[in-house]
């Protein structure tokens, strides 16, 4: 009976995935079209339309992290914190490493009372989140004393902007140090507005007012939220290797095994989640956009960075998001000029695989990008899969393979990537792989995916 139940669950899982995948190829509009319309609707403040278009983009290309992050932004603008948290979390699961995504995910988790998840996300991405935002976000997530320390250090290090000072003032208030909060807030808030500022903070100071605190900070009105539609759940869209593994398990369940048979071996490979778009430039991820809404005519926004100044990518590049949801910042009165804050240096990443001098591509092309084709449970399987990739995609001929050990969520994987590409040729190869039903994403070799570890990094020789 247990075997029958297990088989039934696997069949149902495969059926749900098949129906979901069929729906995204038969009737949904092209993902990029829906994505562009969602961004335009967000810029115009048409939140309901933005949600409709963003959901269509996700359904058409369910494993694209940028589309899911945009869907999270649309949900957040509508005050749907639960749905937004799900969408942002799935975007990160698919490989979105941007600091602003982690920051907004943490805020949505705070808004629904999950401080533990918020703190974990902030700790994991702290190098890509501005410290002025990190300190206040931690304070909102229940780590007020720690947030105060980070903000004090930030100001001492030279970031004495009005935004940083007001974030510190609010962190003091969240820590219960109202005297210090008043002193710090008075640095930028006129005397006749100071009591109103502190009263606003006090009105949402109770521990159970977590949603109100985030809503007030972002200038949003929360609504009843039933959660993201189930048919958009990332679990409904497994990778090709995951589907193959389920099919193999179904086949095993059909075979009657002798009582003395050895236990089933673990799956040969487990595909990692792939991003359908190239990871964003390090300078963007290092300085997440920080905006605030003005709640009164006497207040203006003092941003650390804004989405619009981000340099537009080359025409061949996929369009970068033009809209980012509000993040952590306290409003500052009109009398205080908005400082210009330079982008923080790009965070240091784990050592990326380096190419042996003798294995550089001989043809005169840019060698700036890698194309990741899969991630597997063992090095041996990774090496075998590289051979399969070469046979399946002739355009890999003459390219090196880069096999990198990585740790993600406590599990070890071996990533398989092809080296020796320029930006355009890497995207072209990815298009070919995706058209044949495979998964891949291109990335600059100077900005590898998160999780790489220093040990056991190998660059295989190019196949001639």
Image (tube, helix red, strand yellow):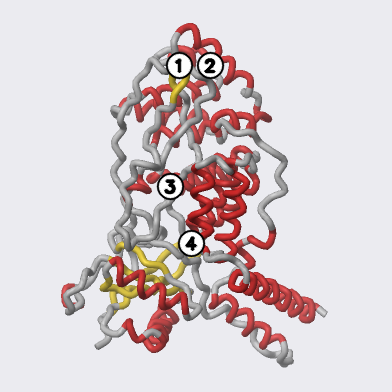
Q: Residues within 10 Å of mark 3 (few under 14, many from 20)?
A: some
On the image, numbered disc 4 is attached to which residue? 32
Residue 12 visible, this angle: yes
Classify residue 335 by image quadrant: top left
Of discs 1 and 2, which sits in the foreground?
Answer: 2
Image spot of residue 3 (x, y percent) = 77, 81
The tag earlier along the polypeptide, 4 or 2, is 4
Q: Is residue 219 shown left or right of residue 281?
A: right
Is the C terminus in the top left, top right, bottom left or bottom right quadrant? bottom left
Q: Is residue 390 shown left or right of residue 19?
A: left
| 2 versus 190 height, above or below | below
For the residues labelled 4 and 3, the Cα–Cα distance comes to 14 Å
The tag earlier along the polypeptide, 1 or 2, is 1
Q: Please, what secondary structure does the residue beneath circle 3 have?
A: loop
Question: Do labels 1 and 2 touch, CB within 8 Å?
Answer: yes
Classify residue 265 by image quadrant: bottom right
Q: Is residue 412 shown left or right of residue 310?
A: right
Identify which residue is drawn at 29% across, 66% down.
423
Say the numbered circle drawn on residue 322: 3
Identify which residue is drawn at 64% across, 86% down.
262
On the image, numbered disc 1 is attached to which residue? 185
Of discs 3 and 2, which sits in the foreground?
Answer: 3
On the image, numbered disc 2 is attached to which residue? 197
The tag earlier along the polypeptide, 4 or 3, is 4
Q: Residues within 10 Å of mark 2 (few under 14, many from 20)?
A: some
């Amino acid at each position: 009976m247990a075997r029958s139940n297990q088989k039934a669950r696997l069949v149902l899982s495969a059926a749900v995935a098949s129906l979901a995948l069929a729906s995204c190829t038969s009737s949904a509009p092209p993902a990029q079209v829906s994505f562009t319309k969602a961004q335009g609707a967000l810029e115009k403040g048409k939140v309901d339309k933005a949600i409709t278009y963003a959901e269509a983009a996700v359904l058409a290309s369910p494993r694209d992290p940028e589309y899911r992050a945009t869907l999270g932004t649309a949900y957040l603008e509508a005050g749907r914190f639960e749905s937004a948290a799900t969408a942002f979390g799935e975007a990160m699961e698919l490989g979105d490493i941007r600091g602003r995504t982690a920051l907004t995910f943490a805020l949505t988790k705070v808004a629904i009372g999950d401080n533990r998840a918020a703190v974990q996300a902030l700790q994991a991405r702290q190098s890509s989140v501005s410290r002025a935002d990190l300190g206040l976000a931690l304070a909102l997530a229940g780590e007020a004393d720690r947030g105060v320390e980070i903000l004090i250090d930030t100001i001492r290090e030279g970031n004495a902007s009005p935004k940083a000072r007001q974030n510190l003032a609010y962190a003091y208030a969240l820590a219960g140090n109202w005297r210090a909060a008043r002193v710090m807030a008075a640095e930028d808030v006129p005397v006749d507005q100071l009591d109103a500022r502190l009263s606003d903070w006090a009105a949402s100071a109770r521990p159970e007012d977590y949603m109100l605190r985030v809503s007030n900070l972002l200038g949003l009105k929360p609504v009843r939220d039933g959660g993201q539609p189930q048919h958009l759940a990332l679990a409904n869209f497994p990778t090709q290797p995951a589907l193959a593994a389920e099919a193999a398990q179904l086949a095993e369940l059909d075979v009657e095994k002798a009582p003395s048979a050895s236990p089933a071996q673990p799956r040969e490979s487990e595909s990692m989640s792939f991003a359908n778009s190239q990871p964003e430039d390090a300078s963007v991820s290092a300085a997440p956009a920080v905006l605030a809404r003005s709640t009164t005519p006497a207040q203006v926004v003092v941003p650390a960075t804004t989405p619009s100044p981000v340099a537009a990518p080359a025409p061949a590049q996929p369009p970068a998001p033009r809209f980012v949801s509000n993040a952590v910042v306290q409003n500052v009165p009109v009398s205080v000029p908005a400082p210009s804050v330079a982008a923080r240096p790009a965070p240091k990443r784990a050592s990326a695989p380096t190419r042996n001098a003798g294995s550089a591509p001989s043809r005169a092309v840019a060698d700036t990008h890698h194309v990741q084709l899969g991630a597997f449970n063992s090095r041996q399987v990774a090496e075998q899969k590289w051979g399969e990739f070469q046979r399946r995609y002739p355009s890999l001929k003459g390219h090196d393979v880069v096999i990198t050990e990585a740790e993600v969520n406590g599990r070890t994987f071996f990533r398989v990537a092809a080296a020796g590409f320029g930006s355009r040729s890497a995207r072209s190869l990815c298009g070919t792989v995706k058209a044949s039903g495979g998964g891949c994403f291109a990335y600059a070799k100077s900005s590898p995916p998160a999780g790489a570890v220093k040990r056991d990094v190998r660059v295989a020789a190019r196949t001639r």
